[in-house]
């Protein structure tokens, strides 16, 4: 079971009739238990790539191989909850097989206990994002796709949720694809970091992180960060890949 | 409270106007009430009201279910929209009277013809409203349902239907008022009972109290159905929305 992405190109037709390339040739694979992190400038085509990987957009050149029976858990950039269903119903509709115990645990971890019967319109954005996370976790996904899940949350909560994501990833052999702007999140969570170029997106560098997630202390993370910063300065977005910076 | 006051004002205006115009053209409220009571105690009022209500119910249910299904299809499937659009425009602009007369000519002066004619008159407005509603469905929620592999029926029931509910309520409300109006014409032209038939009789005899007695009872029934059925449904369908200040 593996996610293999081999996109050779994606063209958008604008309303004015022009065409532009959004994705340049892109190729990578992800194994169960692995967290791939996509880092790139805003508007470089990350969301388009995710849509292709999720099977929402079939109009591209190339090939994406997903395990056919893979359950997908997705946290979209905006929460995308059903406003007319309560928090609990939102989760249960996406994950009908979830047990009460599992649901209670998720709600406890994400501090949503008090909001079970609330409607999404009554929640702050931060809370709605947590509901979206609960929904993605509740399906016990084989493929977990997180599109900037920690944006607009305060540091303390973001840190806790990051740990939760790490716990979940460790507990099951789930393939995780994380899109983020935060190098910190990327280094703390990722096994392999893919640095993307501006549009049309291609992979500038693939950086594996050798230290296992649970062993990454603050010092190690700072060192990796410094290493990455040195590389960026040295190469200015060069194309060498595969060097282990840890 | 305010509604009662408004109703009292209506009665007062009526009464004063009746005093000026005279009983033959505009009978006073008590005179009309007297006819209502007489018709009710003989059972005729309920017979005719019942016949009309049955026709309204059948035609309304038929037109709403068929119209909603066609509207949803036309909103979702481009081909259906392009095929159905000319028919829709034709039906929308066809006068109710033409449909009713043609139905009676083709199918005879039967119950089926009456109900079909009423339903056909209401159908296109339901289609148009539901098509708009379907076009306005939130694509991002469709994507969410597809990513989480929601079965088709569950996605329709929990993702699409709640978004369509305000449109269904709007179609029901405008459709109900349309059906109320048309059913009387259909009864007047070709049915031996119903409020429309009675109004036709009253017209021939220039019997204004009887005409008012029947039409006002009918209006009262419409009002009751509107407050007891349509409005609660609307309120339930939109209860997740923050209330307007």
Image: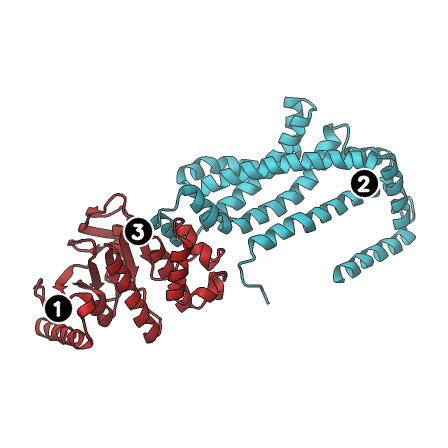
Chain colours: A red, B cyan
Q: Which residue is mark 3?
A: A72
Please report whichever mark, 1 or 3, sits nearer to the chain's N-terminal start.
Answer: 3
Where residue B71 appears, x then y in whole percent?
50, 41
Q: Chain of mark 2?
A: B
Q: Residue at x 23, y 52 (%)?
A: A11
Q: From what the image shows, is residue A163 above or below residue B145?
A: below
Residue A176 at what x, y percent from top left? 24, 57
Mark 2 surroundings: few (<14), some (14-19) or many (≥20) residues within 10 A: many
Q: Is A16 on the left-hand or right-hand side of B171? A: left
User: Do pointers 1 and 3 mark residues of a single chain?
Assistant: yes
The 10 Å Cα crowd at callout 3, few under 14, some 14 to 19, many 20 or more, is many
Q: Of circles 1 and 3, which is in front?
A: 3
Cβ–Cβ under 8 Å for marks 2 and 1: no
State the mark number for residue A237. Answer: 1
Disc 3 secondary structure class: strand
Report the residue marked by disc 2.
B214
- Label 1, residues with CA under 10 Å away: few <14, some 14-19, many ≥20: some
Q: Chain of mark 1?
A: A
Tell me if I can see residue A243 in this picture: yes
Q: CA distance from mark 2 to mark 1?
A: 84 Å
> Do marks 2 and 1 both belong to one polypeptide chain?
no
Residue A245: image location, x then y, percent: 10, 69
Considering depth in this image, is A97 or A64 the residue closer to the camera?
A97
């Amino acid at each position: 079971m593996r996610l293999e992405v081999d996109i050779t190109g994606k063209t958008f037709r604008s309303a004015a009739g022009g065409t532009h390339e959004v994705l340049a040739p892109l190729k990578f694979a992800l194994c169960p238990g692995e967290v791939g992190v996509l880092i790139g400038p805003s508007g470089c085509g990350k969301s388009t790539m995710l849509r292709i990987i999720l099977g929402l957009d079939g109009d591209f050149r190339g090939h994406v191989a997903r395990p056919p029976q893979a359950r997908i858990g997705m946290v979209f950039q905006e929460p995308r909850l059903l406003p007319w269903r309560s928090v609990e119903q939102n989760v249960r509709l996406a994950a009908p097989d979830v047990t009460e115990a599992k649901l209670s645990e998720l709600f406890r971890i994400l501090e949503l206990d008090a909001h079970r019967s609330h409607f999404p319109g009554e929640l702050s954005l931060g809370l709605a994002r947590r509901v979206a996370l609960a929904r993605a976790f509740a399906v016990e996904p084989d493929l977990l796709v997180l599109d900037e899940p920690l944006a607009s949350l305060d540091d303390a909560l973001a840190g806790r949720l990051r740990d939760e994501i790490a716990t979940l990833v460790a507990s099951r052999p789930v393939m995780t694809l994380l899109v983020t702007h935060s190098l910190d999140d990327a280094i703390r969570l990722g096994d392999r970091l893919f640095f993307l170029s501006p549009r049309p997106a291609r992979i500038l560098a693939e950086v594996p992180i050798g230290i296992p997630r649970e062993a990454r202390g603050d010092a190690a993370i700072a060192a990796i960060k410094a290493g990455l910063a040195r590389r960026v300065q040295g190469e200015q977005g060069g194309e060498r890949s595969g060097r282990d910076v840890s | 409270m305010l509604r009662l006051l408004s109703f009292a004002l209506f009665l007062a205006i009526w009464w004063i106007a009746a005093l000026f115009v005279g009983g033959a053209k505009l009978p006073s409220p008590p005179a009309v009430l007297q006819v209502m009571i007489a018709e009710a105690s003989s059972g005729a009022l309920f017979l005719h009201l019942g016949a009309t209500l049955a026709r309204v119910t059948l035609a309304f249910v038929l037109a709403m279910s068929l119209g909603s299904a066609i509207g949803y299809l036309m909103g979702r499937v481009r081909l259906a929209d392009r095929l159905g659009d000319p028919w829709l425009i034709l039906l929308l602009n066809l006068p109710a009277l033409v449909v009713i007369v043609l139905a009676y000519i083709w199918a005879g002066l039967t119950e089926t013809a009456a109900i079909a004619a009423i339903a056909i008159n209401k159908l296109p407005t339901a289609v148009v409203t539901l098509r708009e509603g379907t076009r306005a469905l939130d694509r991002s929620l469709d994507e969410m349902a597809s990513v989480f592999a929601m079965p088709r029926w569950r996605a329709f029931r929990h993702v699409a239907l709640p978004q369509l509910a305000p449109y269904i309520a709007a179609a029901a409300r405008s459709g109900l008022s349309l059906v109320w109006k048309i059913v009387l014409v259909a009864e007047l032209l070709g049915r031996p009972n119903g409020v429309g038939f009675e109004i036709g009789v009253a017209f021939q005899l220039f019997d204004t109290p009887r005409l008012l007695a029947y039409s006002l009872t009918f209006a009262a029934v419409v009002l009751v159905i509107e407050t007891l059925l349509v409005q609660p449904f609307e309120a339930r369908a939109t209860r997740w929305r923050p209330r307007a200040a």
